[in-house]
Amino acid sequence: MTHDVLIIGGGSAGYAAARTARDEGANVGIIDHGPLGGLCILRGCMPTKTILRSSDIIALIKRANEFGLSSVSPKANLSAIIDRKARLIGEFADDRIQALKDSRFTLYEERARFVSPHEVQVGTQTLTAKAFIISTGSVVSRIPLPGLEEVGYITSDEALELRDLPESMIVLGGGAVAVELAQFFSRIGTKVTLIQRSRHIMSEGDEDLARPVEARFREEGMTVYTNTQLHRFTKNGTQKVAHFTHDGQEKTVMAEIILQALGRRPNIDGLHLEAAGIKTEKGRVVVDRTMRTNHPHIFAVGDVNGLHEIVHIAIEQGEIAGWNAMHANDSPRRYDDRLKTQVVFTDPQVASVGLSERECRRENISYMTASYPFNDHGKSMTLGETHGHVKLLADPLTGTLLGAHIVGPEAAELIHELIAVMYFYGTVHDLMRIPHYHPTLAEIITYPAEELLGRIPK
Ligand SMILES: Cc1cc2nc3c(=O)[nH]c(=O)nc-3n(C[C@H](O)[C@H](O)[C@H](O)COP(=O)(O)OP(=O)(O)OC[C@H]3O[C@@H](n4cnc5c(N)ncnc54)[C@H](O)[C@@H]3O)c2cc1C
Ligand SMILES: NC(=O)c1ccc[n+]([C@@H]2O[C@H](COP(=O)([O-])OP(=O)(O)OC[C@H]3O[C@@H](n4cnc5c(N)ncnc54)[C@H](O)[C@@H]3O)[C@@H](O)[C@H]2O)c1
């Protein structure tokens, strides 16, 4: 069987590529061994955000007194939370499965492997195509820490299926998976200890964004160790024990369950990329800005290229590859990460777009920055949501926004004004001219903008 475009992996990136290539007139084949639906829907973005809603609500109910309401002692029913998640995820997955099975595509529910740069084996069939788009996603990294495999652990996959509330949990790591799930379990009643190697959680971002989240975690009763080195894991009866160094001191922590959230790696297992001569580097498929691999007719998009494991970026890359695959002789579309955005859905939320201070320093980019705290902002005070701040980075001469970062209430929503302004190469002057309703959380953006405006040479 021959196709114009063959997509290997029908998750968010692959489906976006398939739809785009189809709209450009391609005869598209999609190969996915299943379960169909993709990480974001089945075990990523959507299930985590669904269960976090329950833990956010319970945390707010526990603060009833603060708002002049009689206190209540809510209790979480983890099994019911998982039922709600399963119901919603089932609906989201059904929509995606229907779309993949649409007659506009040919769906092969098989595992794919390359036989040559122009052929892919699925079951007993060999498929050929003018272009291939690899979108096989990522898998949890196995980290060789002594004793960890032997004592056993769960990953985010199993954490999203637990029905009995663990009494205690050690969370390894301080990335997005670790912090979102750590706060979920802590808020619904598990005694959580989070162990992070770097000096602060969410170590890819600026330190000032992590500190308010760590403070909130500790206030809520979580134990957070940063700046650690994990040594080994042992068992004490049914308890699992982590042995580590913290600030130079030997420590041990015991818990019923270990959640291993030490990162994911591109999923190239069993694809036989070598049979097609596709270049990889540190386990990721190497691509250029047009999403092409070292073969111009083979593309790789989403988590499998290891650029950013974020779903809207996976979709954007899929659309770029789907279009480029059908326009080999036109000027190619390119992926641009100027507006790279990430949100972590803790409370307070953390949202970033564009450059961080760390990136500006590393790349020698001149910038000026100003921050404003939510605990001095009227609307957040009325809401009782005063953790965190807004930080803007701008060009010191022109005031053009280079990056924007929010740690605080509704950061995930608030960041979109800044994404829009940056999309149009807007400046701090623009932020001051755009009307902001009073009293809103969004008004806070004007305070650091005003400070930066005052620093621009007249
Ligand atoms: C717990 C968690 C929470 C997350 N939360 C968020 C969030 O809130 N926001 C956000 O932006 N991102 C989030 N992410 C990241 C996001 O889910 C991923 O970046 C995104 O889903 C990746 O999409 P993809 O299309 O690259 O891969 P996937 O969706 O994983 O698709 C890969 C597909 O390839 C198929 N496949 C694999 N190998 C083969 C093969 N050999 N042959 C045939 N088919 C194959 C698989 O069955 C799968 O359907 C989260 C991730 C995790 C783990
Ligand atoms: N809200 C969101 O958008 C969201 C939510 C969850 C996941 N994701 C995406 O999924 C991807 C995977 O997330 P993740 O949190 O699993 O990975 P990650 O790479 O973001 O974090 C892994 C953490 O483990 C630590 N670590 C790694 N090896 C270690 C070792 N040997 N000892 C001690 N610590 C070690 C790292 O310092 C880091 O803090 C991320 O890229 C993230 O963007 C996004």
Image (cartoon, rainbow, N blue to C red):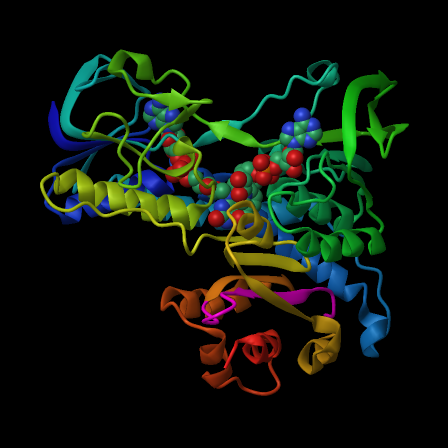
Which residue is nearer to you in this view: 359 or 32? 359
Rendering quadrant holding ligand 2: top right
- Residue 378 visible, this angle: yes
Magenta-colored stretch includes residue 253: no
Q: For the point 43% across and 25% down, which residue is it?
A: 267
Q: For the point 18% across and 16% down, which residue is it?
A: 126
Which residue is nearer to you in this view: 442 or 329? 329
Quarter of the figure that contains the N terminus:
top left
Magenta-colored stretch includes residue 387: yes
Which residue is nearer to you in this view: 281 or 380? 281
Q: For the point 55% across and 45% down, which residue is it?
A: 362
Q: Main secondary structure of the magenta part?
A: loop
Q: Would residue 221 be found to the left or right of residue 412 on screen?
A: right
Q: Position of residue 387 (x, y in %)?
A: 74, 65
Snapshot quadrant of residue 238? top right
What segment carries the magenta color?
Answer: 385-400
Q: Position of residue 266 (x, y in %)?
A: 45, 28
Q: Would residue 317 be found to the left or right of residue 430 on screen?
A: left
